[in-house]
Amino acid sequence: MKKTIICISLALIMLLSLTSCFKSENKYDYTMSDYITIPDFIGHKVEFALDSLQASIDSQLAKNAKEYTVSVGDEIYVDVEFYKITYLVDEETGKQYDQQGDKIEELSQSNMKLVVGSGKLGRILENGILGSAIGDIIDNKYKDSLISQLDDIYPDLELPEGKTINDYIKDGVKVVIKVLNKQIKAGDVVSVAFKGFRLDDDGNIAKNAEGKDDIFDESDGSSFFIGSELAIKDFENNLIGMFIGDAHEKEFLATFPEDYIDESLKGETVLFRVKVKGLYVPPVYNNDFVKAYFDYDTTEDFENELINQFVVSAMYDYVLKNCTIISYPTEEYNAAMKELSDIEASFEKQYKVSLDSYIKSEYNMTREEYVKSNMKTEMIYYAISQQNLLIPTEALLKNEREKCIAYYKDYYMQNSSMNAETAYSEAVAFVDTLGPSYIYENVMFNLVDTFFKEKAELVKLDKTYTSISETIAKEEAPSDK
């Protein structure tokens, strides 16, 4: 795994830095060609499907989606209850207090389908719903401002002979609205719990070797963008129109495409049981989005960076698969293993998990495999650096150290109560703990990555579909079909 400034946790950074294999002050006091041979990767062809780019964009939109709240034009379901207002008088002070009285059954409605802004409940009541979430209860008292609208809201209301709406609410009314639910539509981000079952030749749920239902996949909270095609089409299309909550579980058949990545599911029809757990609204993919979340000025800049990351990864993978390890440097291997042993007790005490368990869960490797994997990556990068004279300069090293300090300063300020001065001091101390080799390798890795990008032959494959996110960005309404 490549080293990077940005990390998941300080524990991971410490682990990576401690297992750095080549820590001598003079980075070129050995010949890496004695240990590894690198294949010729200059001009290696890297095919990049623009569908993959769109999938990456939609994944980021789903990741940064906000919890759904009601807005104008939404079709929602609500309970609307009207109550009379009665008055009590404080005998000592003579002050009047109002309180909820009897429910007005004639005006109340259950499970009403409402397009917010349509006027079905009147402007005043519908404005009160805006910004609420599923399950919210809006409780307000109204007087003259609402009474004037009710005749329009209920033009065909049948009341007892001689009664008018005003007779019910002449002293005011209390209205309680509960936002019940909303149907899922294309363009939403949903969190779903599901189980996928294989079927036998008779169309029933197949059994596995243990005699239990053959569940090939399940999740308790997968989130994705409906219309991004990150899930198979049949799955996404069946979610459209569903409601949120356990009571609205849906069972449906879905067929996997013939080109599906899992050979055992290609063209197969399976049974899904699905519940929608949460509903979210993705941001619009535009310049403002990439500026706010990724600090790029334009979507073009952002997309170029995503492509560059893919190219670097593809080039590295090519070298990784085709390089030849002559031997692992014994001294460096033993030193890396010793450093892991030295931190083993303190790591377990601090993080409440054994070092070997952590490495297994994060990388699915043994300790020995983990060290050799790190060494192999470093050997590749050092060898390419040596062969092509990609040597970090003092200016680059200084700039990288400042970037590291700035990153950890922000990290400490965001994850603790430290002020800026204290966070800066802690960041400097931590970066000094990581040592010059960490800074050196960050710069050297970046130099080699840039070299990978420059020497690759990029072939862009055409897009095969238009994502819902592209439709929304053009301010067009997505289709639910």
Image (spheres, helix red, strand yellow):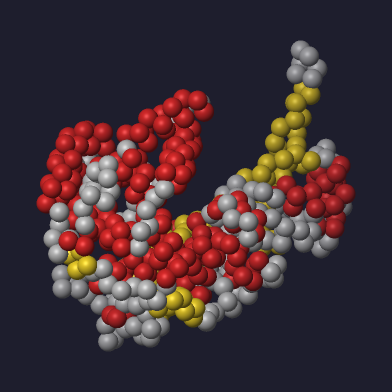
Name the spot of residue 54 as percent of width and height, x first.
Answer: 52, 70
Work out whether residue 131 or residue 302 is closer to the camera in this orientation and state it.
302
- Name the residue: 80% across, 53% down: 123
Q: Quadrant where the C terminus lies? A: bottom right
Work out whether residue 295 or residue 116 is closer to the camera in this orientation and state it.
295
Say left or right for 274 vs 11: right
- Name the residue: 85% across, 58% down: 152
Give above or below for 116 relative to 458.
above
Name the spot of residue 82 as percent of width and height, x first.
Answer: 72, 47
Q: Is residue 360 visible?
A: no
Say left or right for 76 vs 24: right
Say left or right for 273 vs 160: left
- Name the residue: 22% across, 67% down: 37
Instruction: Report which quarter residue 15 is drawn in.
Output: top left
Say left or right for 91 vs 323: right
Q: Quadrant where the N terminus lies? A: bottom left
Work out whether residue 362 or residue 116 is closer to the camera in this orientation and state it.
362
Name the spot of residue 296 as percent of width and height, x first.
Answer: 59, 55
Give above or below for 48 relative to 70.
below
- Name the residue: 27% across, 72% down: 39
Name the spot of residue 69 as percent of width and height, x first.
Answer: 62, 52
Work out whether residue 364 or residue 167 is closer to the camera in this orientation and state it.
364
Q: Is residue 401 visible?
A: yes
